[in-house]
Amino acid sequence: MDTHIQADIPNPTTQYPSLAYWSLHPDGTLFLFVHGFGGGATSTWSEFENRLPRRQHGADLIFFGYDGLFRHASESAEHLYEMLDNLLSAPGRVFSQARPGPRRQASFAYTRLVLVAHSLGAVVARIALVAAHDRQAAWASLVHLVLFAPAHNGTRLGALVDHAVSGISIPGASFATSAITGTLRAYEDLKEGSAVLTTLRDDVREARKAGAQHVAAKVVVWAIDDPVVVNGPFPGDPPVPQDQQFALPLLTRHTAVCKPRDTHLAPVYLVEQALV
């Protein structure tokens, strides 16, 4: 790739590093991706790391790594908030941790952030953005939120677990539903009507009343007849589907809705819509 360099960003708190693609000619734009329940920093978004840099030469890309199974959404949201706060207030802190870090002037600052989240990631991202409002973060107005198959209205839990644990083995743990409920903390958070989701809805509504537009999504994409999450409106979000031209066959799958392919570039176009 002649426009970007790849780098790892270790997480000193968890064992889940993030992956960055630093632009060689930065224009102040950052795309930050947050995976969902049981997903991976890059595997959830496969091909975005190849497709988006070809179109956005000046943008940095970061694929945020976190534990999407065994930590509560609020814990992961705090880690995400810390990364956002560093990137948008003092990016040099993150650059110095990256291997390799980008070569940037000391005065470099991001001027816009597209925060892209899938499934559980939508809940994690929105909790972090509510925290930005509560803490009066100066950078909050730079954020544009894009959501794919968001889980903020709850999940169909059996399908969610089947999706997340397929092919995964955890020593000493059974994946029977009765065992999972007490093992996977994020699982409890995503139950339809859970305290986490109810509180989030109330917090977003109150933040918007106070003028915090960044807590509402600019673009929302549902998987058609999603068997994993409950599709439905959320305070302040635009109606879905955005445009019937994007109602392609691949959009019927919860995990495929956010993965661009040669014959399915809609995810890239939809992410770029946030910049308009």
Image (cartoon, grey):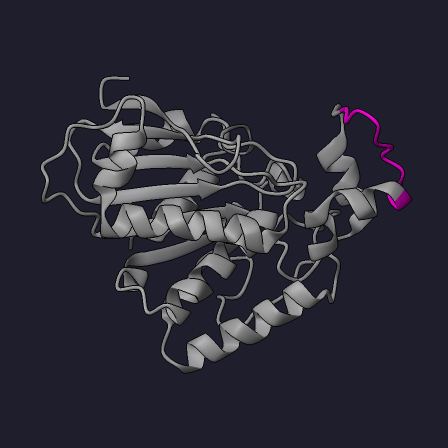
* Residue 218 left/right relative to 233: left
Who is closer to the viewer here, 112 or 194? 194
Who is closer to the viewer here, 211 or 80? 80
Q: Is residue 174 above or below residue 28?
A: above
Which residue is at the far front?
13
* Residue 240 left/right relative to 38: left
Residue 217 in view (yes/no): no
Quarter of the image containing the C terminus?
A: bottom left
Quarter of the image containing the N terminus?
A: top left
Q: Is residue 257 above or below residue 236?
A: above
* Residue 87 left/right relative to 117: left
Residue name at image x 41 percent, y 29 percent:
10
Q: Position of residue 7 (x, y in %)?
A: 33, 23
Who is closer to the viewer here, 197 or 218? 197
Which residue is at the far bottom?
209
Q: Quadrant of residue 183?
A: top right
Q: Position of residue 166 (x, y in %)?
A: 76, 28
Residue name at image x 89 percent, y 38 percent:
176
Q: Is residue 180 above or below residue 129?
A: above
Residue 92 in view (yes/no): yes
Residue name at image x 71 percent, y 51 percent:
225
Q: How many marks?
A: 0
Q: Quadrant of residue 218?
A: bottom left
In the rendered image, residue 177 lying in the magenta stretch gets the answer yes
Q: Which residues are magenta?
A: 169-178
* Residue 186 left/right relative to 272: right
Residue name at image x 9 percent, y 36 percent:
105
Q: Would you say the magenta stretch is mainly helix, strand or loop?
A: loop
Q: Is residue 88 above or below residue 239?
A: above
In the rendered image, residue 173 lying in the magenta stretch gets the answer yes
Q: Position of residue 61 (x, y in %)?
A: 34, 35
Q: Position of residue 120 (x, y in %)?
A: 61, 49
